[in-house]
Amino acid sequence: MAGRADIENLLKLVNSSAQEALALYENQGLDLPLLSSTASHPLDVADDSLDLRKVIRVLEGACEQLCSTLAPPVHTVVNRGQNLDWLCLLVVIESRVADALAGHDKGVHVDVLSKSVGIESGKLGRILRLLATKHIFSEVKPDVFANNRLSLVLQSSSDASYLTMCHTTLAPRAVSILYDNLTNPGSALSYNPKDSPYMQAVKDEGIDGTFFDWLKAHPEKRETFGRAMLGLGKVMGQLSVLHPIPSDFPWSDVSTVCDVGSGVGAFSLPLAKAFPHLKITLFDLPETIGQAMEHWSQHLPDAKAPGEVDFVGGSFFDEIPVTNQDVYYVSFAIPSSKKFFQHFPSFFQFRNVIHNWPDVQALQILGAVKKAMGPNSRLLIHDHVIAHINQTELEAARVEPAPSPLLPNYGAGSQRTYYQDITMLIMYISKERTLDESVALASAVGLRLEKVWDLAESSLLEFKVME
């Protein structure tokens, strides 16, 4: 009867989480749009939809576990191995099908659409039909396709479309040689990004370096990558932490904030708008700070008054001269070297460029921050955090597990974090850290973990100086 009990509990989770999600949509004063609709709901574009993200995490985890439990194992495994959604997404993004369908609410026949996007109608129809089966596009009549709520994300005006393009064009180049890279004696034990599966896959291009050296040699890909990083921030909901109601972080009790590795202020500018009482200091490389000052003068000119916002140049690998702040905010998903800034100055506004630092560099940054902190300062590290399937002792003490019978890490409800981890492996031989790994690094420089703030897609780790 244990199997039946799990199924009944999963069904309860599906029902309760679906009802909670529906209530969140209706609390906005609008009905939930149908999948076939091209109308946008406020929650579709909200920065503070943390409550919805947490509910969907449970719903996705329960639905996936329910199907995996009831379906024959071969059905589930073969479906996952045969999944070609990404390939069809690649085709429709590259050919801008969603753009071509814009304004045609009643749909466009595939013969007509074929001429607009340059793909033979029979082949195009098969690709669109697979996606429509997954609710991306609608087949309103036989061979007549239209945009819907999901396909709007694929329009070229959407940063998320560029993120999807990167996922479907870059990492797949290395997929076919991943096993060889993991087992070849020359690369199996390496954590040098020059030896990544991606760089091995493009070695015939003669580029001796990392993915960013490859990106420098392909300027046509730079804008795509930059737009993708904006899309990643949106998908992660990285600004949820600014909203006290969903995140519960007490910004109203904070007076001073130093944004370490600030870029032009992708985090601190919205922070200043949300909490004008804060004294904020941006700290980054001098050339970056120059651009930050210009950026702020355009987007928040009133905040440039002396004493309200400071702009300080320097290297967080050496020393942080901004001392004794209430909060030091660090995202380890920022560029890892001066070389990156020199090659890609237009990326100064993006925080989510390289997920994770090598341990040596991470220790340097944490050590510099710790020296700048006062006895009551807090360090906030905002990043993906990988959870074990079965919680470690530290995770059990600090992180609330998913409701039973879900896996403690929410299973498929948190799958994108694990996809991101493997993407880092493929592109850079990098990784997303576990909570235990992050705490070990912080402890090595004299910082203790105070609290873990669950932001669904990411986490905020709060540290203080050890007494």
Image (cartoon, helix red, strand yellow):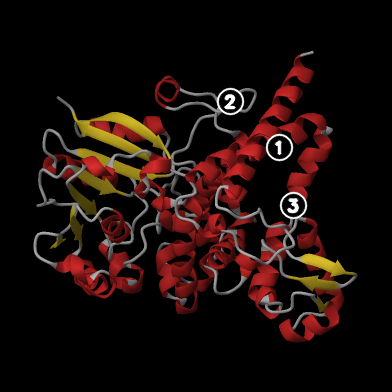
Mark 1 neighbour density, 10 Å: few (under 14) some (14–19) many (20 or more): some
Q: CA distance from mark 3 to mark 2?
A: 28 Å
Q: Is residue 259 visible?
A: yes
Q: Position of residue 264 (x, y in %)?
A: 27, 65
Residue type of the residue flagged with mark 2:
Pro
Identity of the amino acid at label 1? Cys
- Going by the numbered disc 3, the residue's amino acid type is Asn
Quadrant of the rendering where the N terminus is positioned: top right
Q: Position of residue 44 (x, y in %)?
A: 56, 57
What residue is at 67 percent from the left and 73 percent from the top? 98
Label 2 CA crowd tier, 10 Å (few <14, some 14–19, many 20+) = some
Q: Residue at x 67, y 61 (%)?
A: 150
Relative to 332, 253 lies left or right:
left
- Most extreme residue toward the right is 142
Q: Secondary structure at mark 1?
A: helix
CA distance separating discs 2 and 1 = 13 Å
Q: Quadrant of the C terminus?
A: top left
Q: Residues within 10 Å of mark 3 (few under 14, many from 20)?
A: few
User: What x and y, as percent, mark residue 427?
Assistant: 49, 56
Residue at (66% x, 30% y) in the render:
13
Q: Which residue is identified by label 1?
A: 63
- Look at the numbered discs 1 and 3 and tell me whether their residues touch, using CB distance below 8 Å: no
Towards the viewer: 34 or 132: 34
Residue projecting furthest to the top: 1
The span from disc 1 to disc 3 (Cα, nearest Å) is 18 Å
Question: Which residue was labeled with disc 3?
Answer: 83
Closer to us: 359 or 16? 16
The disc placed on residue 403 is 2
Q: Residue furthest bottom?
A: 115
Between discs 2 and 1, the one toward the N terminus: 1
Q: Is 92 or 58 nearer to us in this picture?
A: 58
